[in-house]
Amino acid sequence: MEDQIRTWLKDIENAIEEINSFLPLNKDFNEFKKDIKAKRAVERNIEIIGEAISRILKLTSTISISDTRKIVDTRNRIIHGYDSVSAEILWGIVIKDLPILEKEVKKLLQ
């Protein structure tokens, strides 16, 4: 694996760790929804994840990460259509998608 790809995978891993640190301990959606700082921090880290995936895909299209297009599209939606990204959308990504991505990235970094 190229060093640059490894660096971007580490960026993704770090962003996921940061997202997890911003979540309420009990992972309560209503608490998250009220916490504007946490929502903005999650948005920013999803942007970082999407940008890292986009850069990886420019070097290789065979990376073992599922839903790469969806990840990049979500990043674009946050950046260009920020008013269309609800707390519900962010929460769904955090609860459903990030655990899968985290496992895939950790496996690639082994």
Image (spheres, rainbow, N blue to C red):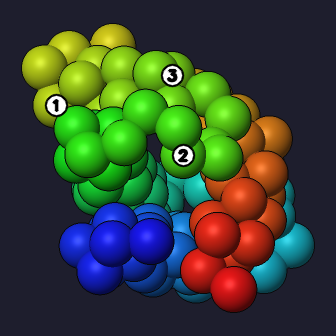
Instruction: Locate the N terminus by quadrant.
Output: bottom left
What is the three-letter code of the residue carrying label 2? Ile
Where residue 36 sits, quadrant-wise, is bottom left
Where residue 27 sits, quadrant-wise, is bottom right
Horizontally, is 83 left or right of 15 in the view? Answer: left
Residue 54, x across and y down, in percent: 28, 39
Query: Compared to 59, does 22 lie above or below?
Result: below
Kindly identify which numbered label has been placed on residue 37: none
Residue 29, x across and y down, in percent: 74, 48
> Which of the two labelled residues, at mark 3 and mark 1, occupies the earlier sequence position?
3
Please name whichever residue, 37 or 80, is drawn nearer the observer in this view of the structure: 80
Residue at 32% x, 49% y is 56
Horizontally, is 28 left or right of 102 in the view? Answer: right
Query: SS class of the residue under badge 2?
Result: loop
Residue extending furthest toward the left: 80
Query: Compared to 69, does 100 lie above or below?
Result: below
> Which of the two labelled residues, at mark 2 and mark 1, occupies the earlier sequence position?
2
Q: Which residue is mark 2?
A: 63
Q: Which residue is mark 1?
A: 79
